[in-house]
Structures are given as structure tokens and as C-alpha cells.
Amino acid sequence: MAEPVIFKNRVSLAVYAVQALLPALVAVLALYLSTLLFHVPFDRNYVAFSAVVVLLCAILVRPAQVTSNEPFAVWADRVVSVFARWFVLFVILMFIGYASKSSSLFSRRVVLAWAVVTPLLLVLTIYVVNRVSTRVLADPANARRVVFAGLNDVSRALADRLQRNKGLGMVVSGFFDDRSAERTGASDTVRLLGRLPDLAPYVKQQHIDVIFIALPIRHVQRVMALVDDLRDTTASIYYAPDIYVFDLIQARTTEIGGIPVIAMCETPFSEFRGISKRIFDLCCSVALLPVLLPLMSIIALLVRLSSPGPIIFRQRRYGLDGRQITVYKFRTMTVTEDGASITQVTRNDARVTSVGRVLRRLSLDELPQLFNVLQGRMSLVGPRPHAVAHNEEYRRLIKGYMVRHKVLPGITGLAQINGCRGETAELAQMQARVNFDLDYLRRWSPLLDLKIIMTTIWQILRNPRGVY
């Protein structure tokens, strides 16, 4: 769910209106400029086209309300989202044109130029508008005054976010808590204004606009009592429960059938994030396969000549949502184990062929998994899939082990670039690998995927360790 948007005055209303209308305005303007560029009249066909674009923009290309001082990774995530949403919009337009047999009414050069230029203009204008809106909404005259019921890690974190991100248009007045300043750690920068019973009178006297109740979820009765006391005010009230006592994966709020819920363990690839990652996987795989096919042909010949057995080793592993998939690899051993018990490869393992040892050291045996990526069974980056036998063993020993299957398994991953590769002779080694996998789920971004890919290539070329 988006951050609360309640307008303090007409200025803040105008700012949010501009942000909401921005995608449609930019798209129509870009279309008009594209017709001018190619000397095509902006006739009624293009007017009708613009109307459809405005409607689709309102549904798909939502404004990215990001303040200018947020980290670059956040901006990168928004940029990917804009391009992914625009791609979906364009595909829908092409389908409408094909189904209605109206595509011949429009210049292909105009439509292509418009499709390429518009997302670039969107990113640029969103950045500029957010820079301006940050300054406007940071003005005390336009900002809403905020107090917190409860002084704890959650309220501190939220207050810090509000103070750093002026574009949210909120100014923190202070906190209320029944504990003393010494116990809560209050200071000059973290003002303790009184006890919880003092909250309602203070809100009425000081004309507070927003109240965040940040009491632990075990204090439901106190929360209900506070809400009841505050009914005699006009302040907006939000509940910020302390759910971070749990080990959360992609925690966020959302709605299901109009009922608000809190996601405590969810995949990072829902909605357009998943689309953007899939597009990235497909584009990279399609680009890499023609380049790598000659090398893969040579490897296939060497595997065939080095020892008897199939060129491609197929093994059952767990994929997305714990469903079994078949993973492809160049065979590097004299055996092809895929049963209830599988012996891991050890140093100087006699089962590894001479060609296989080189392939494993350079991770070239993993190249056939690009076909797994094309099939949609794997991703370029994600937790490495383990054999079914190993999964059944470790899921009983390691808490949260199966959570790593909330995303597609990857050819490489965060665990692998941090040295968690090869044999897991001790439970602690697999625990470390799982910890990195879960950390990947928590902080995924397109930039993290790119970093993992580049680091993997560098480590392979440099001197990979722990692989035999």
C-alpha cells in the first residue's frame, strides 16, 4: 500500500494532482512531438489513440512518489518499474491495434519513436517533479504535524523516515509513552511530550494532524482505548504495529478484497517486479546463447570423449514454491546420481572426470541451465537449487530452509559470490548458504542482481575457491 496521502491545503492537493496526472500528460505530449518530428498530422485517429493511452496510464503507469534524497537503489527500482509498466501498456496497445485492425492508421515510425522516448521522458519528469514537490511539501505551511503513541524502534524508525524525507509533508512534534525518558532513551532530538493519557488533550490543544500508534501488537486493549479517546479529535490515526520482532521476508502492507493485511513472508517478485526480472532473464539468455553455443558444442564433444555416459546430466531439484524441476548440467562425473541418497562431491573425488574437473572449476558445467532459464524454471540470479535428497535432509535441520523457494532458483546467487559453494560437509556451511539466500530475498533489487552476475564472472576468471 502507498504512503498515506491526505491533503493539508490546496498547495499539497495541487502537488499530488500533478504527480497523478504526470504519466498521462507526458505520454500524450511525447506522442504529439513524435508526430511533429515525422511531419504526420495529429488527426482524430491520434486523438482517439491518446484517449486510450490516458486510460491505460491511469490504470498501469502509476506515479512514482519518491523523494529526491532516497538511495540510488530505490530510484533504480522505480526506474525498472516505470519501464516494465510501460512495456505492458505498449503490448496492450499493440494487441488492441491488431484486434481492431486499426494499426495501419498510424505511422510506424511515430509509434516506435513514441514507445522508446516516452519512458525516458517519464523517468526524467518524475525526477524533476519529485525534486520540486519535495521542496513544496517540506514547507511548514504545507506539512502536517505528527505525534507518536509509543516510543520504540518502530516509531523511531518511522519518525526518522519522516524527518529525512521532507517530501512526505509531515513534521514530527514528539512522542507519548508511559515509561520515563530514561527508560525510553528520549533526548533533545527525540522529544517525549508526556504519557499516553496526555495524548488526546495535547492533540486537541495543539491541532495535531496525524497520530501514529506504535504500540506492540500484544497491547491491543490499550490501542483500542487510545482510539476511543481520540474520537473527539479530527486527527488522522494510523496503527504502526511492532511486527519486526519476527524474521520478516519482504514485509509490506497490502489489501485483499478491501481488507488490509500485512505481508510477513512474501516473494520480492510480485506484480511488475516479477515481470521486470523475467524480461531481464529472457533478454540475457537470448543474447548469451548464440554467443555460447560454439563453446557449449566443444564442451559437449569433450564430455562425450572423456568418459562413457550422457553429455547432459539431468537431476531433480526443488524450484519455485518447492515444486520439483529438472535441472540440466554438463556431466562432470562417471555417475549420474538422482535418488533418495546422493553423495556430495569432495576434494579429489575419483568420480569426477578430468574434463569435468576443469568444467566445475570454471562453472562451465552450469551453462545448459540457460535453457532452464528460457523454460521459466530458473533465473540467472537466485538461491542455488539443491538435489531433492539434500532438500529433504536440510529442511528438517535448518529453520526457514524452504523460504528460499519463494523465488525461482538461480544459476548463481548471493551465497555463491560470498564463498558458499561446493561441498557442505558441516551443517554450519549449509546454514550460512541459507542465510545468504534469505538475505537476497529481503533486499533484492535489479542492481543487486547485476552486482551478483558481475561478481560471479570476476570470481570465475580470477581464481574460484571451494569448487572441485
Image (cartoon, grey):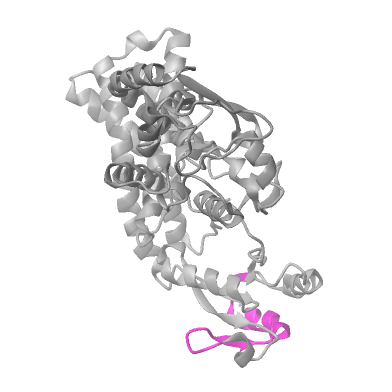
The one of 17 and 283 positioned closer to us in this rendering: 283
Asked whether the viewer can see residue 18, the reply is no
Q: In which quarter of the image is residue 368?
A: top left
Residue 189 included in the magenta stretch of the image: yes
- What segment carries the magenta color? 186-211
Q: In this view, does 268 lie above or below 292?
A: below
Q: In which quarter of the image is the C terminus?
A: top left
**What residue is drawn where x is 62% and y is 70%?**
212
Q: Is residue 212 above or below residue 313?
A: below
The one of 71 and 446 positioned closer to us in this rendering: 446
Residue 63 included in the magenta stretch of the image: no
Residue 151 in picture, x, y percent from top left = 62, 79
150 on left or right of 314:
right
Residue 252 in picture, x, y percent from top left = 59, 53
Asked whether the viewer can see residue 414, the reply is yes
Q: Quadrant of residue 290?
A: top left
Residue 21 in picture, x, y percent from top left = 42, 42
